[in-house]
Amino acid sequence: MIKKILIIVFAALVLCAGITILSLAIKNSSNEKELYSTYYSLDEDFIIEAANGSMNQKKNTVEFIKTAFNSGANCVELDLTFDPSGVPYIESDPYNIKDGTLKLEQVMLMMKNEAPYKHCFIDLNVNGTENLSLIDELCEKYEMTDRVFYSGINLNQSSLVRELSSVPFYLTMEMHKSENNDYLTEAFNDISASGAIGVECELDDMSLLFSSILKENWMKVSFDNINDKNDCVKALLMSPGRIKTDKPYEVLEIVQNWQNNAPVEFYGIETTAEN
């Protein structure tokens, strides 16, 4: 008798799991269908950023940078710190700087001179703000002014960053997926007052309403940790300025599919890109 009950319970659990998986598959398919039926709305400078150390590469290395740019990314995340004399290094901790640690200037030289990287971007995750004025000098020297930005900047640091450097930055904020008008107004005012080009957050912390408000006011939304197809589709439905991922090629493939399948208007007649 107990054996029969266990069999029935097990069968019920398998059935529930099957229904859950099927429901998720239907929902994911619905999101993808919605994306491909929506007008393609990404900016020309939309960024697919390879998360530092992704694709089984060591963080902050030339090997990681080259692998990222050869895998569909047009931007790499790198750590930025300074040695005691103010020289900028690609490292998260100044105490870890040693012979052979990659300098920011080496990266910029490579990206200026090597053809595959001439239109790619660098996201500098800032660990220490005191010498940021030197970054402006390097950007100008290597013609990278329009291809470098900062991340990891919080609200308390934003005024100092603006004072020291003209390099644009995303504001890191703890967001809440809320449509409360008071909350949205306060969050918008904080981002606007910071001088940031936009805000970086997790996908589940951003509402479609708030992303639309930001875009209408020429501010960008950036999503971190977008590493599966459904999350990528949901993120793209909010027309972000940047997606950071461990899988840049997969994100690029979805973006290209959207671009190829999205409806377009031709003399007032709605059709699809394939037509």
Image: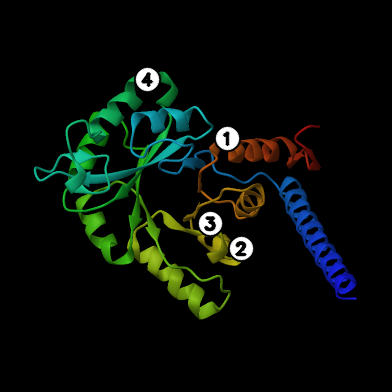
Q: Quick one: label 2 or label 1, which is nearer the N terminus?
A: 2
Q: Callout 3: few (<14), some (14-19), or many (20+) C-alpha neighbours within 10 Å? A: some
Label 2: which residue? 208
Residue 140 position, x and y percent, is: 25, 33
Q: Which mark is residue 249?
A: 1
Residue 139 position, x and y percent, is: 27, 35
User: For numbered disc 2, what is the local secondary structure?
Assistant: helix
Label 4: which residue? 114
Q: CA distance from mark 2 to mark 1?
A: 25 Å
**Left or right: 212 as drawn, with respect to 186:** right
Q: CA distance from mark 4 to mark 2?
A: 39 Å
Residue 52: quarter of image: top left
User: For numbered disc 3, what is the local secondary structure?
Assistant: helix
Q: Quick one: label 3 or label 1, which is nearer the N terminus?
A: 3
What's the amino acid at mark 1? Tyr
Label 3: which residue? 215
> What quarter of the picture does the C terminus occupy?
top right
What's the amino acid at mark 3? Lys
**Left or right: 142 as drawn, with respect to 17:** left
Q: Callout 4: few (<14), some (14-19), or many (20+) C-alpha neighbours within 10 Å? A: few
Identify the residue at image location x=35%, y=66%.
Answer: 193
Q: Quick one: label 2 or label 3, which is nearer the N terminus?
A: 2
Q: Is residue 142 visible?
A: no
User: For numbered disc 1, what is the local secondary structure?
Assistant: helix
Q: Callout 1: few (<14), some (14-19), or many (20+) C-alpha neighbours within 10 Å? A: some
Residue 168 position, x and y percent, is: 34, 48
In this view, the residue in front, 200 or 56, is 56
